[in-house]
Image: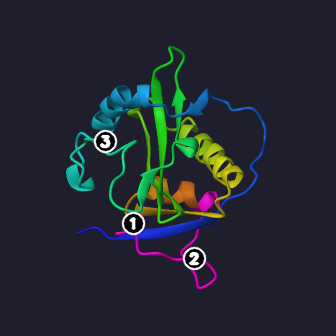
Amino acid sequence: MTASIRLVAVTGHQKTEPARFPVRPLTPDDLPELAALHRHVYARDDARGRGGDPGWIGTPTSEGHRTAEAASLVATGPDGQITAAIIITERYGEAVIDELFTHPDHRRQGLAEELLRHCLHALHTLGSTTVTVTVDENNSAAMALYLSRDFHRPTDDDTEYDYD
């Protein structure tokens, strides 16, 4: 069994330089395409417990949980297809990165970093002061991304909730 590590970051104003890739808020019309991308990305990884079915996106997952549409974003390719997405869930009033994934053909281009930067700015604008994420300890690419954006293990100074 692989362990997970929970990280937290303070949201804040991010560099306002234009996006290198088209980034926009997730809309309900995106859900079929997003579901297909999610299944493709996680085709070999059923350990996530959702079986590659992101039907939970855009709907309440349980009491106190809901998708934060204003901070959930997608990056699109030249033909308008979704190439990456970040899904934010509000859990008991706190922002949580539930998913951040990129199509395998579009990895290593900065899409996840771009989405994360825009998401942190959107959360700050919406009044969220922190955001948390749970990362598989063996996912070195994800760990490197979050650590590069000043995520850290929660301390007594951070508001800490048990989301599982």
Residue 137 position within the rendered picture, expressed as x and y whole percent measured from the top left: 39, 66
**Is 27 situated above or below 64?**
above
Amino acid marked by disc 2 = Thr
Label at residue 54: 3
Verify whether residue 3 appears in magenta: no
**Other-residue count near label 1 (Cα within 10 Å), few / some / many at <14 / 14–19 / ≥20:** few
Seen at 46% across and 29% down, the residue is 83
**Cβ atoms under marks 2 and 3 closer than 8 Å:** no
Location of residue 130 by image quarter:
bottom right
Q: Main secondary structure of the magenta part?
A: loop
Q: Amino acid at mark 1?
A: Glu
Among the two numbered marks 1 and 2 on one chain, the one whose residue lies closer to the N terminus: 1
Instruction: Check disc 3 and give the amino acid type.
Output: Pro
Which of the numbered marks, if any, corresponds to residue 75? none
Spot occupied by residue 127 in the image (x, y as percentages of width and height): 68, 57
In this figure, which residue is indicated by the disc labeled 1? 137
What residue is at 50 percent from the left and 34 percent from the top? 26
Q: Which residues are magenta?
A: 147-164
Q: Extreme top residue here? A: 79
Label 1 sits on a secondary structure element that is loop
Asked whether 49 or 91 is in front, the reply is: 91
Instruction: Count residues near mark 2 (Cα–Cα under 10 Å), then give few for <14, some for 14-19, many for 20+.
Output: few
